[in-house]
Image: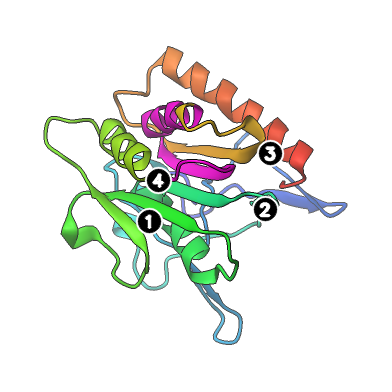
Amino acid sequence: MPEPGSDTPALPEQHDGHLHWPRKPAPVARAYTVRRFDPVAGELDLDFVLHGHGPAGNWARTAEPGSVLHLAGPKVAIIPPQGADWWLLAGDETALPALGRFVETYGGTVPMHVFALVDGPQEEQSDLAGVTWVHSRPGVSDATVLAEAVESGAPRGGEGWMWIAGEASIVKELRAVSKRLGIAKPMLDASGYWRSPESDRPLARLRLLREQAVETLEARRRGTT
């Protein structure tokens, strides 16, 4: 995306089949899951959540027909491991595109349990069949609300694969749930998509970066990046 006050963004360059990202000026970019792609119509859908901050949300808030985005990717592909007895996927509203892709394209036989946290019934997406919709509650953190629902509704027994994504504190709480459920580290995929102002403190940021580095190394060992 263009930097504030500019119409021309800094872009990566392609060399030897790889994208090289300049450092100065560094591109203003964010990673998104494609919600839908129609190669015949030449259409690609992205869902934006407006948090009130962040370059992508701010761009989407003022976007109109003719506004330009530059796309590169795919950057990461998630390949669920073989041999799981069940799948459990959970996240907040920023994880809905990825959850939607899982739900709409799944053709396997392993039972899949999906939990999505949204503000209320008006934010549910009725076209996503089989999703357990969890609603925010006044006076209770979103991390606690979603963690309670996931732990209560998760299968017991067998070996599960767990995919979690969303705000950093939510992912942290769901990590704790995965341990209580006995999910082995190779069977956990976790991604912190964004940070609320409460979790955007130096120590919390350092912990998140460390966790993301560990996840990237584990994903590379599994061949999913």
Q: Which of marks 2 and 4 is nearer the N terminus?
A: 2
- The reply to whether residue 183 is visible in this rendering is yes
- Which of the two discs, 1 and 2, sits closer to the camera? 2
As drawn, is 98 to the left or to the right of 50?
Answer: right
Q: Name the residue under label 4.
A: 91
Question: Of residues 92 and 85, which is closer to you in this image?
Answer: 85
For the magenta stretch, what is the residue range? 155-179
Q: Which residue lies furthest to the bottom in this view?
A: 40
Q: Name the residue under label 2.
A: 79
- For marks 2 and 3 on the same chain, the one whose residue lies earlier in the sequence: 3
Question: Disc 2 to disc 3, how far (Cα)?
Answer: 29 Å
Residue at image point 51% right, 46% down: 30
Task: Tell me where residue 13 appears, x and y as whole percent.
Answer: 74, 50
State yes or no: discs 3 and 4 in contact (Cβ < 8 Å): no
The type of residue carrying mark 3 is: Pro
Mark 4 or 1, which is nearer the eye? 4
- Mark 2 crowdedness (10 Å alpha carbons): few <14, some 14-19, many ≥20: few
